[in-house]
């Protein structure tokens, strides 16, 4: 990422915004949660976003958008690690704004039509049992 930013600064198009969408799930009940499973989920979310924040701190970005989740506020069955990773994104957005930098953290609910909530059968079944319906991505 540092190399890519160095290239845009030298020869590439000017970077005006960042969209951070990386994420993985590794769901499990608390008793089965391990430091490794926490790290697996924190790395692309909290780690990736922190890295982007650090590397772009000197740029005049008009947008720095983080794909967080409603689990950051409501929690989610078996998603202690995922909830923590998303809460980090929300806090990072607050902290960036306090520094006068652009930041938006979008706490998405579940969406339909593909993505991590549909890719995994277990996650799909658990979400299906919950109160939130998956959002239809097709325009109405
Ligand atoms: N789907 C939903 O209902 C939902 C709801 C709320 C929030 N979100 C959030 O929205 C974002 C996108 O979700 P999605 O459903 O589109 O998931 P997705 O289809 O599984 O896409 C996640 C992306 O993250 C990338 N990624 C994973 N680990 C990475 C790493 N260490 N470094 C760089 N990239 C990495 C994956 O790349 P590879 O394909 O190369 O592995 C993949 O392209 C995620 O942050 C997710 O938490 C999704």
Image (cartoon, rainbow, N blue to C red):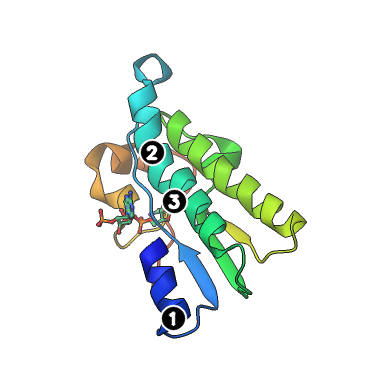
Say which residue appears at 45% left-offset and 45% top-offset.
47
Residue linked to disc 1: 10
Foreground residue, 42 or 77? 42
Foreground residue, 55 or 32? 55
Label 2: element kind: helix
Asked whether disc 3 touches disc 1, contact meaning CB atoms under 8 Å apart, the reply is no
Neighbours of disc 2 within 10 Å: few (<14), some (14-19), many (20+): many
Residue sitting at the far front: 10
Distance Cα–Cα, label 1 vs label 2 = 33 Å
Say which residue appears at 48% left-offset and 34% top-offset.
76
Neighbours of disc 1 within 10 Å: few (<14), some (14-19), many (20+): few
Residue linked to disc 2: 41
Distance Cα–Cα, label 2 vs label 3 = 11 Å
**Left or right, residue 61 beside residue 140:** right
Label 3: element kind: helix
The tag earlier along the polypeptide, 2 or 3, is 2
The tag earlier along the polypeptide, 3 or 1, is 1
The tag earlier along the polypeptide, 1 or 2, is 1
Position of 102 relative to 80 (above/below)? below
- For residue 48, which numbered disc appears in the image? 3
Residue 126, given in percent of the width and then of the height, sits at 35, 36
Q: Quadrant of residue 113?
A: bottom left
Label 1: element kind: helix
Position of 132 relative to 41 (above/below)? below
């Amino acid at each position: 990422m540092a190399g890519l930013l160095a290239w845009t600064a030298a020869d590439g198009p000017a970077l005006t915004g960042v969209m951070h969408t990386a994420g993985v799930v590794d769901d499990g009940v608390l008793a089965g949660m391990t430091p490794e499973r926490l790290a697996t989920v924190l790395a692309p979310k909290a780690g990736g976003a922190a890295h982007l924040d650090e590397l772009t701190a000197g740029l005049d970005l008009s947008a720095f958008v983080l794909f967080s989740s409603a689990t950051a506020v409501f929690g989610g069955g078996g998603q202690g690690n995922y909830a923590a990773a998303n809460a980090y994104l929300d806090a990072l957005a607050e902290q960036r704004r306090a520094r006068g930098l652009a930041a938006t953290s979008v706490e998405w609910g579940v969406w339909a039509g593909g993505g991590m909530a549909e890719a995994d059968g277990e996650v799909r079944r658990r979400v299906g049992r919950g109160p939130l319906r998956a959002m239809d991505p097709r325009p109405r």
